Amino acid sequence: MLKQPTPETASLVHKRVSDPLPVQIFLIGLMLLFFIGFIFLPLGLVFAQAFQKGWSVYLESITESYAVEALKLTLTTVAIVVPLNAFFGVTAAWAITKFNFVGKAALKTLLDLPFAVSPVIAGLIFVLLVGSRIPFGSWLGEHGIKIIFSTPGIVIATLFVTFPFVVRELIPLMEAQGRDEEEAALTLGARGWQIFAKITLPNISWGLLYGMILCGARSIGEFGAVSVVSGHIRGQTNTVPLHVEILYSEYNFAASFAVASILVFLALLTVGLKVTMEKKFQKNSSHH
Amino acid sequence: MGIELQDITKKFGSYTAIDDISLNVASGELVALLGPSGCGKTTLLRIIAGLELPDAGKIILENKDTTNLPPRKKNVGFVFQHYALFRRMTVFENVAFGLTVLPHKERPSRTEIRDRVEHLLKMVQMEWALKRYPSQLSGGQRQRVALARALAVNPKVLLLDEPFSALDAKVRQELRRWLRKLHDEIHVTSIFVTHDQEEALELADRIVVINKGKIEQQGTPQEVYDHPANAFVYNFLGNVNVFHGRIHNGKVTLGSHRVDAPDELKHSEEKPSRTFVRPHEIGISRIRSSDTDLTGTIKEVRLMGGQIGLNLECEGFEHPIEAEIPRDLYINLQLSRGEKVFVSLNRVKVFTGDYAI
């Protein structure tokens, strides 16, 4: 005979399948401590420092022309980098998942290189590549194309550092989806671009958006590689993170943290976007 | 002629998937490519559709050489094993896809597309699901939508890759009969690939048995079943008992017994033979009716729906013999485990080739 479990037996069953209470408390407590120590406290401090000298100083710091220029440069970089990396990412993921070619495994490993290499080294590589020590660099110089210490350099360095986000998001997704739908479209008379626009792109849209958000977040905050190629020219080649650093090294703490708070806002915005995306993404994939 | 394949060969590296296959399919015919997995049948289907290119040979569809045409110009309807419905599109959009991607000049008007899609969905009994997404449908329903989608472009040839393999047994049977009926109505030249002999026997006008990239035999289900060309075909088309023995002086040895060899082997020289008997072609009786009957003991009784499966240990035979008898007979004879019975091998098939099974 089956009996309805009484509250006691129910809680017994519950206890048996989960960890002992002290372990639970310990782990949750540890996690909370981590969050407080590494996220909430520093975040609070940023705002406390930013508003240390009051609203007027805060507003002045973030509306001052160098800060505005820095923000413009950062947003311009993001606006160029994200679409380009979306394009490169889709192309690379497409090539890797839909075709077989020699060196595919090697290419797949190399895709992670930008994550493995220190951003500062990445920046230095570009300085060397387009610097006047190398024929290519001097050729660029002779034709008046300036890359280092100017916006193109910042864009290229950011492109390199943030390249893996989109492609790493897409490869597992496209591998899981296989080629069946594309082949079906092919037998139904669709051309290559129709297949891409009507089948492939809609199937990867959420993953692509998600990768682009991560790529954007990293582009906003990138410091190391950009620091090497930018030259820190105020009002010209200073991105927001670089501007924060300069203000800080000038002991202008209130202004430095005020500008940093912009980065915090942008970060919170992307995290918010990411959470919404994740929810939609999960809904969509559980749907299928 | 609906489909003509001439000397098709396809290799993947050093592995020969299709080994010089030629095959004709008449217009309006429904043909089954039957074979074990890895025999090359799906590859052959993909070659006809243009999804793989053959290394050698020609594909002629409706008297037109299509060997080097891209898939979209072949006008072939392909139903994939896992349906491959477009997950981001509704059932309507799925079925309409082949029409909406046509170049502007050839594309039917919106209302024409709508009418055609609705007609097709009615035909596959899915008209109620117009606005559903594939994820909201069951396997059998997806299969029917995939079929409607393939038929939307008026294909000259319909190709189905293991159309029922992903469905459960009951749905599989229903859909099988339904597809046969549909084919009788629309008469599009069709090839389907299967590893299930029952499916092939029930559904096809003609069966092509393939093994290791070669055709073993082709013919109507009746011909292939009753007159298998070789041991492989016989074995693949159903359950069998195999007896290894020798053929000598017009007699075949079966265990310690000797039976008359079939006419075509009457005057064969002495050589090893294998004799096949299907379980349902074995007679079970309480009375000895002929002196060739074997005596056996029932070791195991299995309920198999309408049939009863018996595992028999027969005198003079090393291995047990499997028999299937109707349930009525089983009840009438009041059989049970451990009983002694007389066993007659009603239809034996003897092969002398050295075909390995």
Image (cartoon, coloured by chain):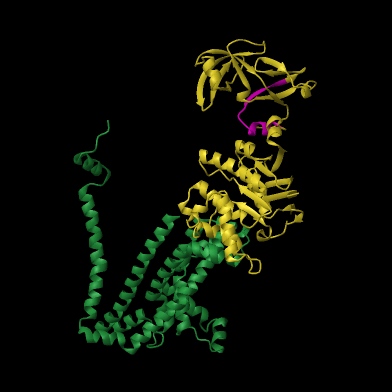
Chain colours: A green, B yellow
Q: Is residue B155 above or below residue A169?
A: above
**Residue in front for this viewpoint, A33 or A215:** A215
Residue at (24, 80) in percent of width and height:
A50
Q: Is residue A154 visible?
A: yes
Residue located at (60% from left, 35% from top): B198
What is the quadrant of residue B212 in the picture?
Answer: top right
Q: Is residue B10 magenta?
A: no
In the figure, residue B223 lies in which quadrant?
A: top right
Q: Position of residue A233 (x, y in %)?
A: 39, 87
Up-down: is A206 above or below A152?
above
In the rendered structure, the answer to whether residue A27 lies left or right of residue B211 reads left
Horizontal and vertical percent position of residue B107? 63, 66
> Percent position (x, y) of residue A214?
40, 68
- Asked if A92 appears above or below B164 in the picture, the reply is below
Which residue is depicted at the point 33% across and 76% down? A263
The reply to whether residue A251 is in sight is: no
Q: Is residue B11 left or right of residue A204?
A: right
Task: Please state which of residues B128 and A22 is positioned toward the viewer in this rendering.
Answer: B128
Task: Name above or below for residue B176 compared with residue A204.
Answer: above
Query: Left or right: where does residue A123 sit relative to residue B178?
Result: left
Figure quadrant of the C terminus of chain B: top right
Question: For this rendering, which residue is in front, B346 or B115?
Answer: B115
Residue B101, position as x, y percentages in the image? 60, 64
Question: In the rendered structure, which segment of residues is drawn in magenta?
Answer: B230-246
- Quarter of the figure with residue B328: top right
Quick one: which residue is furthest to the right in this view? B267
